Amino acid sequence: MGLSMRGKVGLGVFTGAAIISFLVPFFLGPIGVGGLSDKATPLTTPRVEGVQGNADWWRSHVKVTLTAEDDTALAKIHYRVGSQAEQVVQTPSMKLYSTSFNVNTDGTQSLQYWAEDRAGHREEPKTMILKIDTAAPVVSFDLKDEYTQLENVRISFSVRDEQSARVSFTAKLDDETDVSNGETVLADDLAHGVHKVRVTASDEAGNTADATDAFRVKKLRELITEYGDNGEIDNGGIINSLYVKADHALDKIDQGQTKVGLNKLNALENHLEAQMGKHIDTDAANALLALTTDLMNALTQDA
């Protein structure tokens, strides 16, 4: 029994629909959101936020935002910071999606990132370098607290930085004179009293440090004057006598007559001890005696 015309038409419609249903995914590829064809690979764009420094460095810890885009529907965003474990962010079925995270460690480290969509397309991993340096250089000094007028002051300090390979610095003595690391300055060329060395350092990222250390130069004649002005030596004749002995000793030392200079300093010591607690305050006498001893030691070491 043959099919009626209506039956033949119905079969033809059914068969045609089945063929179309089969051919659509074959020619159009994977189907994305809303039945749209997904042919493209996702594209991920990074954005870094923080305090920017010099030479591609960041002077703060940073926030990284990865924005992935697909023609139909994203599935995942992947990223890895340095040697840390890979992180996978499951995304909604959207064409555009962003995820953010913080990088809170100093140093130079790689950031690798990529995305994939729901059709199985996987973006080739991309890499960017993050250079983070949040710390200023560290300045350390190697200066004595005190120098006698017969000593050399060696300007000595170190500058180090954990991240930057190159650190620049300048040094000034008393905020006036440029000095270099390791330079020697004659204490006798400096004024009696306190002096300071100031070092300003900058690392490659632009972090700066400003550090200061102080030392005191003690000069015999000036110290006698200081105690006389303060009333700790209360007799003008004794002050003049101390001047004479101090000047004679230092003159002989300047002339290279070290032995004679030592004898003159020894005579000054005897005078100080004789007047201690009388016309010379005990503390002042002890300070002058200590300086005299330091001068004698400096001469002995140089001999």
Image (cartoon, grey):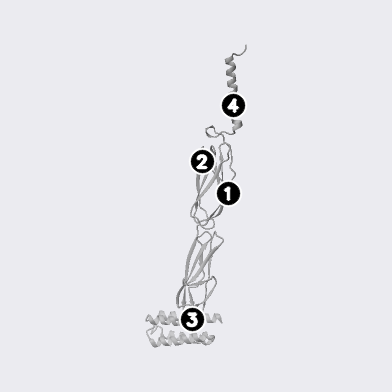
Quadrant housing the N terminus: top right
Instruction: Give the amino acid at mark 4.
Output: Ile
Q: Which residue is mark 1?
A: 127
Residue contact at pointers 3 and 4, CB within 8 angstroms: no
Secondary structure found at label 3: helix
Is there CB contact under 8 Å for labels 1 and 2?
no
**Mark 4 or 1 closer to N-term?**
4
Q: Amino acid at mark 2?
A: Leu
Report the amino acid beneath label 1.
Thr
> With 274 as the anchor, is 108 left or right in this view?
right
Work out how far the residue at label 1 is from the one at label 2, CA to CA, in angstroms. 21 Å
Determine whether the residue tagged by mark 2 lies in a helix, strand or loop: strand
Residue count near mark 4 (Cα–Cα under 10 Å), binned few <14, some 14–19, many ≥20: few
Task: Compute the Cα span from label 3 to label 1.
Answer: 67 Å
Q: Earlier in the sequence, mark 3 or mark 4?
A: 4
Q: Is 238 positioned to the left or the right of 32 in the image?
A: left
Q: Which residue is mark 2?
A: 96
- N-terminal of the two: label 4 or label 2? 4
The image position of residue 290, as x and y in percent, is: 46, 79
Where disc 1 sits, the SS reads: strand
Q: Give above or below for 181 relative to 128.
A: below
Foreground: disc 3 or disc 4: 4
Residue under numbered circle 4: 20
Mark nearer the N terminus (1 vs 2): 2
Q: Nearer the viewer, mark 4 or mark 2?
A: 4
To which residue does mark 3 refer? 293
Q: CA distance from mark 4 to mark 1?
A: 44 Å
